[in-house]
Amino acid sequence: MDFSDFGFLKIAAVAPPVVIADPLANARLIGQAYQAATVDSAIVLMPELSVTGYSCEDLFFNDDLRRATEVALAELAAACDDRVLVVGAPWWLDDGRILDCAFICRAGGVIGAVPKIAQPNYDEFYEQRWFSSGQGVAIEVDEELGRFPLRPDLVFKLGHTAFGVEICEDLWSANPPSGQLALAGAEVLLNLSASPEAVAKADYRRNLVQAQSGRTLSAYVYASAGPSESTKDVVFGGHLIAAENGRLLAEAERFRLDGASMSVEVDCQRLRHGRQQNTTFAKAPRTGVVMVDAGGAPALPELARTYARQPFVPPDEREFAARAQDILAIQATGLARRVRAAQADRLVIGLSGGLDSTLAYLVCIDALALLERRAETLCALTMPGPGTTAHTLASARGLAEATGVELREIAIDHAVEAHLADIAHDGEADVTFENAQARERTQILFDTANRVSGIVVGTGDLSELALGWCTFNADQTANYNVNAGVPKTLVAYLVRWYARHRAEPALSAVLRRVLETPITPELTPTRDGAINQHTEAIIGPYELHDFFLFHFLRTGAGARKIYALACRAFSGAYADSEVKHWLTVFLTRFFAQQFKRTTLPPGPKVGTVSLSPRGDWRMPDEATAAAMLADLASC
């Protein structure tokens, strides 16, 4: 498999040791670092002025240094194979200016050079003594080193992606050139730097790289000079950082005297998807750039990058605690605002004793607290039917008792039986039998809401909406669905977090009981009083479906890419054939059930993925998954 087909590009960043003012020695060190980089790296990035050393000071005026630099660059370029080398060196113009440049080399030659625009001349920096700004420079170099463009507005086309280059202080400036490079199509931004260390500066530098990658919807890779530079007044740490759309991908250990290196795999296809969706990015004014053909991207037969099995759930406990509080606050605030708008006296909710209705119930309690109303304002109904077990009924009763809410029990058996008889149904446990129960419960909820001047709170989650695992004009509808933006895997974590951190002992015990209950709609008759309908046995594991949903909607991945990533993420848990089977189910249901999402009731968006037909996801009901399924079948 070639992961470059899915938009992945491997980039190595290196901070090799330098010999100050000895370009030929540095060429050997850089060459060794370049050769040591993995063969599937598409780009190998070195720090600012790494051919001479950043800290040469007035030696930059020396003619011997100039001649040695030209020879060293020629040696480096000639030794380049199919991997792009981006290396820093000064360049002396005939008009007396010296430019601080990045040289881009590949396949035995230099294909372009980018000059630094911003020269800092404050605090420890004194660059304007030696270097001129590259702003406005646009020349064609034609010397022994070769023929190539030298200008700051170069974008290098590498296969199906593109990269741009800026140098150190350019990133610190008010208007970094990387912004226009990104708007011109560079999904990857490279920064050759020489940033000295100071207390807390690494944090600031890291935040700056992350922020610029997020602002430009790019992968930003940063390589700074290491501690073999002069330590006369400052120390350089060799800070290597990589971020993708605001998220830190990798960071190397600083202060390594013998050099540091790291490699990352960036997902350019995902970045393009994000840019296409972001109208602010798409409509931003562009300035002209010069495109340089850097050739095809090398193959990437293996992928080291890992993907979480549960992309909606933060792996870090502290991060999840903050996320849980935010989600619950969004849900409760949205519901409270809805109550005020509707001038409703009560909230009406159906309690099944399952996960989704339990989370919605907790949100109702929080919303009433925001409105400074008593918990008794909540009107909770449980409506046992042919498939209801004693276990889930006890859970529903326990929730109400632990929170001081009156629970109304309305059995639906006779109503469903009468309805089925009216339509000449024989009582067989088919889809009509199941849906009649769901619609009967919804009718009771809405009619009760009319009687108590209330609104019906929906309980269905994001995963069920994606799969269409809801009955049209039944649990598919509500006055306001607080769980509409919460995927199933996250629902379980939220209930568990609530049980541990917010619930009193009695409520916590009930919540743990709910968490131990198999996921089921309980719409078929029980078997000896036990649950007879297990959702995940019918439609597949929710952890797989949530993985598919995230990568389909959030990253824009196609069927083959989702399959490849899922096989890696769930290796050892599911066979590849199982992954393909359930992905087929996901795609088939997602497309076929869009009509249920087209008429969704309002509900709060809580994360980056939403299926609201008024907001994040608009799709014709008649769309077909045939092409994606055919592509998947070819895997």
Image (cartoon, helix red, strand yellow):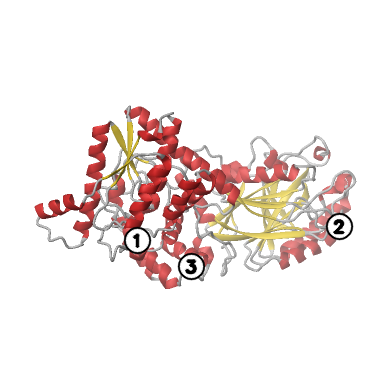
Q: Report the residue at 36% width, 49% height from top.
A: 396
Tell me residue 73's x, y (percent).
76, 58
The C terminus lies in which quarter of the figure?
bottom left
Q: Disc 1 designates what residue?
A: 535
- Whole-angstrom CA distance, mark 1 to mark 2, is 65 Å
Q: Disc 3 designates what residue?
A: 567
Q: Amino acid at mark 3?
A: Cys
Seen from the viewer's position, the closer of residues 325 and 566 is: 325
State the SS at label 3: helix
Marks 1 and 2, the one that precedes in the sequence: 2
Instruction: Please indicate, yes or no, whether residue 216 appears anywhere in the rendered image.
Output: no
- Whole-angstrom CA distance, mark 3 to mark 2, is 46 Å
User: Is 156 left, or right, of 355 in this rendering?
Assistant: right
Q: Amino acid at mark 1?
A: Thr
Tell me residue 97's x, y (percent).
79, 42
Q: Report the residue at 32% width, 62% height from top.
A: 531
Q: Disc 2 designates what residue?
A: 19
Pointer 3 with pointer 2, Cβ within 8 A: no
Instruction: Please indicate, yes or no, whether residue 493 appears anywhere in the rendered image.
Output: yes
